[in-house]
Amino acid sequence: MFHASVPTVDAASVPAEGAALLDVREQDEWEAGHVDGALHIPMGQLMARIEELPEQKLYVLCRVGGRSAQVVQYLVAQGRDAVNVDGGMYAWEAAGRPMTSADGNPFVL
């Protein structure tokens, strides 16, 4: 369970240019649809792959926001600047933000 103190931002407030997006969903979820340019590291692999994270502020996404909140809590405890994208990919789609699928077609939830 995560604490209410996890920093969050709504999908519409994520900068359209230059934001470092971290998608922590599983491979099948990623292939179904993701944000073009996002870094994909499934939650279970994060500790082993933490050196792959850029040093800038991270906007962390999952399907609805639960896993990403846990990842943000961990990253903040490690001294990283990270925020949870509230509502995850569902909120991203609802905000009209662009997504793609593994085959390059537009993403549909």
Image: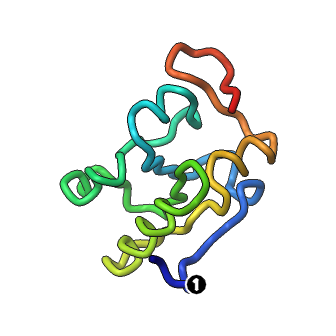
Q: Where 11 falls versus 16 (above or below)?
A: below
Question: Would residue 2 be found to the left or right of residue 93 on screen?
Answer: left
Which residue corresponds to the image point at 62% horizontal and 60% vertical from the top-left? 85
In front of the other: 90 or 83:
90
Which residue corresponds to the image point at 50% horizontal and 20% vertical from the top-left? 102
Q: Amino acid at mark 1?
A: Ala
Which residue corresponds to the image point at 48% horizontal and 34% vertical from the top-left? 30
Q: Where 30 falls versus 77 (above or below)?
A: above
Indicate the quadrant containing the C terminus: top left, top right, bottom left or bottom right.
Answer: top right
Q: Where 50 falls versus 79 (above or below)?
A: above
Question: Would residue 94 be found to the left or right of residue 39 on screen?
Answer: right
* Residue 76 percent location from the top left of the image: 41, 77
* Residue 59 percent location from the top left of the image: 54, 58
Which residue corresponds to the image point at 58% horizontal and 84% vertical from the top-left? 4
Q: Quadrant of residue 51?
A: bottom left
Q: Quadrant of residue 86?
A: bottom right
**SS under mark 1:** loop
* Residue 16 percent location from the top left of the image: 70, 46
Query: Which residue bears the numbered disc 1?
Result: 4
In front of the other: 98 or 29:
29
In front of the other: 73 or 18:
73
Q: Quadrant of residue 9?
A: bottom right
Indicate the quadrant containing the N terminus: top left, top right, bottom left or bottom right.
Answer: bottom left
* Residue 7 percent location from the top left of the image: 58, 76
In front of the other: 100 or 29:
29
